[in-house]
Image (spheres, rainbow, N blue to C red):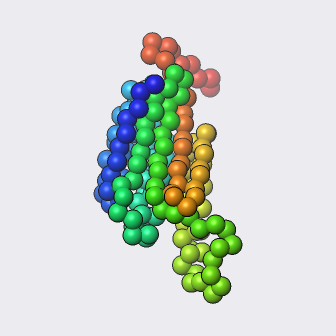
Amino acid sequence: MATVELRFSAVPGHVRTARLVAASVARKAGVDEAVLDEVRLAVGEACTRAVGLHQSGGITAPVRVLLIEEEKQFSIEVGDEAPRAVPGDRTHGAHDDADVEAEEDEMGLAVISGLVDDLEVSAGEHGGLIRMSWPTTPPGTLAFTSR
């Protein structure tokens, strides 16, 4: 199992770099060429989400991306350090900005789920993690698709 770890400051400009690195490592790991655009888009969406959470929360810690090459799959983990409130833990009369942010967060996750077959999302008081994975084709193996 080979792992590449990427950490970057929560700046939107670094999301492009994360997408390029993820696509390059995915290609090397054996992810089908036809799926690489989905990998790029999913990583971009997950990293953009993490950057937004860090910026809105005033968090200076870097966004973490792990690119994990396993025997038959390639996984990407995007982690943030933005704490999530426990549902129902809002102060009475809290501003509607939290509702708008929650809706935007749900939309981002919906986009990612449309690009990834295997998706896990977890969040808690110490941050969140999005884990996405795609199947790989071992080197020297021909992949056939039916039409």
- Depth order, front residue of 114/56: 56
Outermost residue toward the right in this view: 88
Q: Is residue 71 above or below residue 118?
A: above
**Residue 11 appears in the rendering:** yes
- On-image quarter of the C terminus: top right
Which residue corresponds to the image point at 69% horizontal and 72% vertical from the top-left? 88
Outermost residue toward the front in this view: 126
Q: Position of residue 91 (x, y in %)?
A: 62, 81
- Depth order, front residue of 57/26: 57
Number of marks in picture: 0
Which residue corresponds to the image point at 43% horizontal and 53% vertical from the top-left? 47
Q: Is residue 31 above or below residue 65?
A: above
Q: Position of residue 78 (x, y in %)?
A: 46, 48
Which residue corresponds to the image point at 67% horizontal and 68% vertical from the top-left? 87
Q: Position of residue 63 (x, y in %)?
A: 39, 53
Which residue corresponds to the image point at 64% horizontal and 66% vertical from the top-left? 86
Q: Is residue 76 above or below residue 31?
A: below
Q: Position of residue 21 (x, y in %)?
A: 34, 40
- Depth order, front residue of 26/33: 26
**Residue 49 appears in the rendering:** no
Relative placement, left or right, of 139 versus 130 is: left
Q: Looking at the rendering, which quadrant does residue 26 occupy?
A: top left
Outermost residue toward the bottom in this view: 93
